[in-house]
Image (cartoon, rainbow, N blue to C red):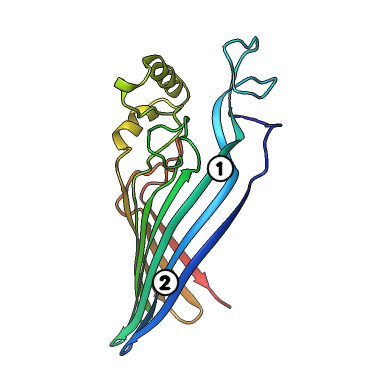
Amino acid sequence: MVNILPNPRLLPETGWSTELGIKQGYRFGKWRGFADLALFNQDINNMMEFTFGVFNPVTYMPFQPTDTVIPVFAFQSQNYGDVRITGADLSASIAGKVGNYMIMGMVGYTYTYPVPKFGTDTTASSLSPILKYRNRHSIKADIGVETKRITFGANIIWRSAMENVDRLFCDERDPETVNLTDIAFYQFFSQTILPGYWNYRIENAKKNYFNIDLRFGFNFNKYLSANFIVKNLLNAEYVGRPGDMHAPRRYEILISAHF
């Protein structure tokens, strides 16, 4: 059972965001497409974050050694503080015909730098300033080929390593510079709540994520079509959050009928 506690001291988020972009279309003979560049910034005050910890079930405050009640492990929405998220997004697409084949392609790159505006996050697993459960870099690409009856395509995804998780789940700081009592506590907590995650995170923290999805379709007529889809072709492991293991390779068949 997972406990979820209220937080009477929770403050509302406030913030502002701005984006500056440019989009340009282009054409080369029978090929046409566009390129798009956007720069963005978002400031959030009193950002709310769903946090896992050890709490006093009466006061809903983080548990203290002087408390006289039995502590509980629980999730609680808390104010993280003021953060700033800056970044850039670049994308381009192109489409054209080669004989009877229509070819379409798209690629996009996103860079984000989400950090606290003041101080450092003392609940993060490493000394990196990046907010927890964020990826700085991501690339998505899609290519498709179509004829009158057959369609084929591939979707490609790449993400840089997730630099921080909750320290309660894994402490990645240099043991020589950290109080060993703290590390022992975090390790005991992690092994109690999520057995195996500590070691998994240590082994995979620096790994980037790369995967491919494939799709193949056939149009029987203007009313009926079928698609065969392969998700996670490379059968890559990916954990977005502790305990949230994404699905392994799977196969899907989709039949569509229009009346």
Q: Among all residues in the image, which is located at the extreme front?
A: 118
Q: Is residue 233 in view?
A: yes
Q: Is residue 91 left or right of residue 43?
A: left
Asked which secondary structure carries label 1, the reply is strand
Which is nearer the eye, 165 or 254? 165
Camera-nearest residue between 234 and 60: 60
On the rendered structure, is 237 left or right of 241? left
Res 148 seen here: no
- Image quarter of the N terminus: top right
Q: Which residue lies at the image location 34% right of the left edge and 43% below the top edge?
A: 237
Q: Earlier in the sequence, mark 2 or mark 1?
A: 2
Tell me what residue is drawn at x 29 percent, y 43 percent: 207
Q: Residue at x 45, y 73 (%)?
A: 22
Q: Which mark is residue 82?
A: 1
- Which amino acid type is shown beneath numbered disc 2? Asp
Q: Which residue is mark 2?
A: 36
